[in-house]
Amino acid sequence: MSVVLSPSLLAADMGYLAQEIQILEENNITALHIDVMDGNFVPNIAFGPDQIKMLRPLTKMKFDTHLMVMNPERYIQTFADAGADLITVHAEACIHLHKTIQMVRSSGKQVGVALNPATPLEVLDYMYDLLDLVLIMTVNPGYGGQKHIVAMQEKIAQLLATKQSGRYGFEIQVDGGINAENIQDVVKAGAHNIVVGSSLFQKGKTRDNVQALAAILEKYNN
Ligand code: DX5
Ligand code: ZN
């Protein structure tokens, strides 16, 4: 399975967004990771459906929306209508996780579930066959630029073992503190969809950073 990058817009300079998106497209990036924060599930506030709607005409890239929002079932249809292609909810934010997963599926969008560092994989035991993606958080959600929690690599490896033994189709995504130094560690552990924020978007350096990360991943994609 090939390894893909999903750049996190949270780290991008909003004044240069159109140019940054063009750089990503020129370098064969196929997805944008859009972090939605409600100031309740996480302390920070970021991106809402209106911003996603505004971004939608700029690119055909897949919109990977990461909802760090309490009770996200209230907003599934809103994000689907705004242009999300993948809607990832946090297990910790859903009282009825199965029902929320079903809501995303019936909206016609791909569905992902994210797990905070302290949340065990077992919460997904009966959900795996319903999911397009499982997101293993490798920082506590809320902010870009945090330090990667190395202990999560064991969790990624356990998830890969479950995926293989159950022959499940979900992708394994990782998010938090990934950079050129540790990206191979998470790939070797079993992740194949890698969110990168602050190590990728840097004004004037974004192109070089994308190309450097792509060069590291090349050997996994042949
Ligand atoms: C954190 C967000 C991440 C963040 C990643 O809560 O979910 O997507 O933007 O940023 P970096 O790569 O800087 O950790
Ligand atoms: Zn994210």
Image (cartoon, rainbow, N blue to C red):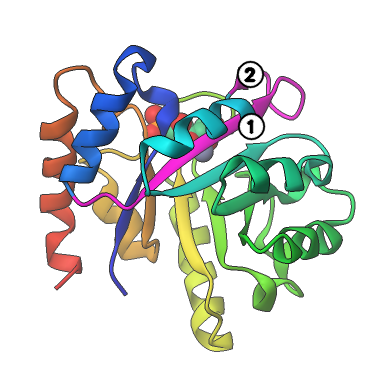
Q: Tag count in the figure?
A: 2
Classify 60 as above or below 217. Answer: above
Q: Which residue is mark 2?
A: 45
Q: What residue is shown at x 75% (from left), y 65% (from top)?
A: 106
Residues marked 2 and 1 touching at CB (< 8 Å): no
Toward which corner of the image does residue 48 lie, by quadrant?
top right
Left/right placement of residue 174 relative to residue 15 reads right
Q: Residue at x 32, y 75 (%)?
A: 1
- The structure residue drawn at horizontal position 27% and vertical position 38%, both measured from the top left corner, is 179
Task: Say if residue 148 shows up in the picture.
Answer: no
The residue most toward the right is 95
Determine crowd level at label 2: few under 14, some 14-19, many 20+ residues with C-alpha closer than 10 A. Answer: some
The span shown in magenta is 28-46
Q: Nearer the viewer, residue 113 or 184?
A: 113
- Circle 1 is placed at which residue position? 49
Secondary structure, mark 2, is: strand
Q: For this view, does 186 lie left or right of residue 211?
A: right
Q: Measured along the vertical axis of the image, is residue 64 above or below residue 199? A: below
Q: Do we see residue 172 in this rendering?
A: yes
Amino acid under disc 2: Ile
Res 37 → quadrant = top right
Q: What x and y, as percent, mark residue 107?
A: 72, 59
x then y, percent, for residue 94: 82, 48
User: Image height check: is 85 above or below 93?
Assistant: below
- Residue 180 horizontal side relative to residue 155, left or right: left
What kind of residue is marked 1?
Answer: Pro
